[in-house]
Amino acid sequence: MNEGRDYQPIIGMEVHAQLLTQSKMFCGCSADYAGAPPNTHTCPVCTGMPGVLPTINQRAVEQVIMTGLALHCDIAETAVFARKNYNYPDLPKNYQISMYELPLCINGWLDVEADGVRQRIRIRRVHLEEDTAKLTHVDSYSLIDFNRSGVPLMEIVSEPDIRTPEEARQYLIALRTILRYLGVSTGDMEKGAMRCEANISLRPAGSDTLGVKVEVKNLNSFRSVKLALEYEIQRQRRVLEAGGRIEQVTMGWDESAGRTVVQRSKEYADDYRYFPEPDLPPLLISREWVEKITAQLPELPEAKAQRFREQHGLSEYDAQLLAADGAVADYFEATVAAGLDSKEAANWITSELFGLMREANLSIEEVKVRPQGLVELVGLLQKGTINRPTAKEVLATMFQTGRAAAQIVEERGLARIGDEDQLSRIVAGVLQENPRPVQEYLDGKEAVLRFLIGQVMRATRGQADPQLAAQLLQEQLTTMKMQERTP
């Protein structure tokens, strides 16, 4: 029995990301198969017909090198495709073209922060392979769709440097952010464009000996990654504390049951009988080509967040939040370029605009309020034409309709009431409708003034100038007090 012994989780991640190329990895079929009828984006190459020859998609190779550079990897001078042999209907030729001993990129790293701790996760390798067909299981038979077969697939393998489920989640978020910045993948886990497996084992705290690892599959969201790892850590701990042994198996995550379930015994590399792909030559990657790709790299999230802090004076939180999505970062900078103060722009985007986007489930590219429109709205607020509650109301209408702020304010009569005569009449009406609070004020209870100001704001739907309203209230109440004292 090992009851009460403390164990340390050891986690490594394998991430597969579909690349955004026009054609498939080894043939000319369109890789844009989303929504297409089954088996309509196919040819003899991606369906594994005898005698066909694959050809390498250069753009896919470039995208993997870009990713490797962004992850601080060493780029190989020679990379070799290999055959990964296994018998399953999703690969009719009974092998997958992948990479094994000589991948494109090795020895990289990615820094992530979780639970207030910054951790460097080493990247073992980034390589290129082909995706498989999609199987749909129905009762006692299965349907197969080859539209996905042969789509370029990049695999990113980390070292077992991750120690907590939250760290694993943050690693995936950071990785997806980089892929989107580079424009090499959508990283959409829900649609299968980014898939991951976690390898997890436990070892006694303080020990250097790794335990038996278990692979967990079917992780299709950041949330499921964290939940599955939390469950699997507890499952393995219970087995070890009861004196049992962990078996090297592949587990699937059952989202509805909230637990991992055994799928099959874990394969070893030898089971796949890797050997160099005889139909493809080695890839010779010149340093000039790598330098050219390096020059095309965009400013990456970490560098952009640092620049936002230094150039725009943003907080660490706001800078990271805005830099986490390239399109959001561009929107922020366009808003600042259009004339809005950096911190004001950050506040409106990360609070009000993000809130509307979450409710509508829209991305920043789909938002109808463009940077210039946001600048004009805040300009009306700063000039005193409208107050902040009204500005938020107008933004919501702009978000739904795409109309200009000034047009909405004018049509709906939302401009702040600053006309003294008009507001004076409203104040008089409020005093007439609230005789009891008025008498309390006249009797010396000056705190009642706040209540009366609130009533004026309510009567004007928040459009009254609060300072002018308070001034007019005090003037009219003073007059009433003097009249009360006059015999």
Image (cartoon, helix red, strand yellow):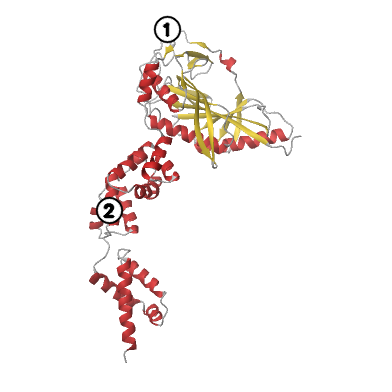
Q: Quadrant of residue 484?
A: bottom left
The quarter in which the C terminus is drawn is: bottom left
Residue lying at 28% horizontally and 49% vertically, measured from the top left: 375
| Residue 389 in the figure: left or right of residue 275 | left
SS type, badge 2? helix
User: Label 2: few (<14), some or many (≥20) within 10 Å?
Assistant: some
- Residue type at tag 1: Gly
Q: Nearer the viewer, residue 474 or 392?
A: 474
**Is 186 drawn above or below residue 312 in the view shown?**
above
Residue 324 can be seen in this image: no
**Is 331 drawn above or below residue 94 in the view shown?**
below
The image shows residue 173 at horizontal and vertical percentages of 47, 36
Residue tagged 1 = 51
Q: Nearer the viewer, residue 111 or 260?
A: 111
Question: Residue furthest toward the bottom?
Answer: 487
Residue tagged 2 = 379
**Is 283 drawn above or below residue 427 in the view shown?**
above
Dot 2 or dot 1, earlier in sequence: 1
